[in-house]
Amino acid sequence: MTQNRPTGVPCPNCGTFIPMTVEGLLGAAPFTCPNRACETTLHINVESSRGSLEILEKFERETAPAQKLKKTFGSR
Amino acid sequence: MADQHKKIQPYVDMAELFAMPLTALIDADAHAAASFAEFIRINGFEPSAGEGFGQLRMVTFSYDKAKPDGTAQTHQVSIPLLSLLPLPSLTIKEANISFGVTVVGAIKSPPPPPPLPSVRAKQTSPSPAIHPHRLAVRVARSGGSQDDDGQSVTSSQVHMTVKVNVVQGDLPNGITQLLNMMSASTSDFRREPSLAVQSEGGRTKLEYEGDAVTLKLELRDAAGAAQPDVALFLSQDADGYLAFSENVVTTDATGRASVKVALARMPPAGSGRVFKTVSAGAIVSLPNGDSQDVSGSIILEVPRS
């Protein structure tokens, strides 16, 4: 069970909130600003973020069983 | 420990019995809060030598942004990991506790706590207990009753039903402020070389013809490293009031250079305040093999005639 606060970052170009997921971060997926007039794309710098990515990976591994249960039974 | 369990009292003060599950709930909430703080410390911050918090863990992104001339410029932005982690802030929203009690008798109230020194001075006799006796109870055995489904319950165990509703708590104010601060401090670094132009001593006003200031120039690459042995070209806007000691200077091992700028001639009478721009430019090599123009400038004021 985790905080409902959306995770992400304000776009450095226009300030629109860019939602990010742990799965996306671990997969080094590009994150595009949802503002159609901006569409700035952020690419994670894997090398300089290695320590933080290891923490995210550990978080993902440890919460995976709970996430699986949540998907199976839904939130009640 | 096993002996302690064997010595469970057959009855307790009813007030204590009511307080026990409430105390357990408060303890549970406190444990959850402590776990949350530990989660923040371990995941959001680098390990520190002591018990405190180390440096914030950051995640770095790069993105391209168009410059006014249409070419793309790569920027880098560092974001605290905490703003990307789902934060498990749990709290007890509601608790329903039900149990029956069996009154086994009355017990004498313990003596009241000693009064404060200021009160004690005025007191002549000890104050009596507010309620001289209290009920001694134990949790009732559940037997012969019916549960929620209407089934008969025959257990002879003492029974306490606790239903706790745990929800996502609001983030504590301190954490919210921390996240806001982190958002505000999200740093953006331009991956572009820079050429700083400053006047020695901060002096930017020339007082008379022949008066001079020394300009300090500093060239750095996108990562902030000094750029040695690069030619810097000096120029000024129209009118040519200024004279440079050299029009081209080369950076030293620290990426620095200096040039003297003098007022060559006075502006015409009635010109009012006159400001002149001195520009410095260079061409630097980028790591990808390209080259890029870098420029910097400073504004100097020349005197009225």
Image (spheres, coloured by chain):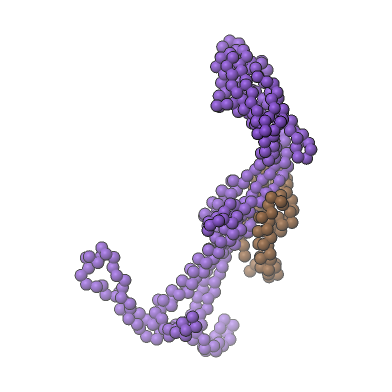
Q: Is residue B72 left or right of residue B21?
A: right
Chain B rendered in what hue?
A: purple
Q: Quadrant of residue B187?
A: top right
Q: Is residue B18 visible?
A: yes
Instruction: List the single residue furthest toward the right.
Output: B289
User: In the rendered view, would you say B251 is above or below A71?
Assistant: above
Seen at 68% across and 58% down, the residue is: A54
Q: Quadrant of the C terminus of chain B?
A: top right
- Percent x, y for residue B124? 20, 70
Q: Is residue B273 visible?
A: no
Seen at 58% across and 52% down, the residue is: B55
Seen at 65% across and 28% down, the residue is: B257
User: In the rendered view, would you say B69 is above or below A27?
Assistant: above
Q: Is residue A56 left or right of residue B161?
A: right
User: In the rendered view, would you say B282 is above or below B95?
Assistant: above
In the depicted view, which residue is nearer to us: B263 or A4? B263
Instruction: List the single residue furthest toward the top.
Output: B269
Q: Quadrant of residue B267?
A: top right
Chain A rendered in what hue?
A: brown
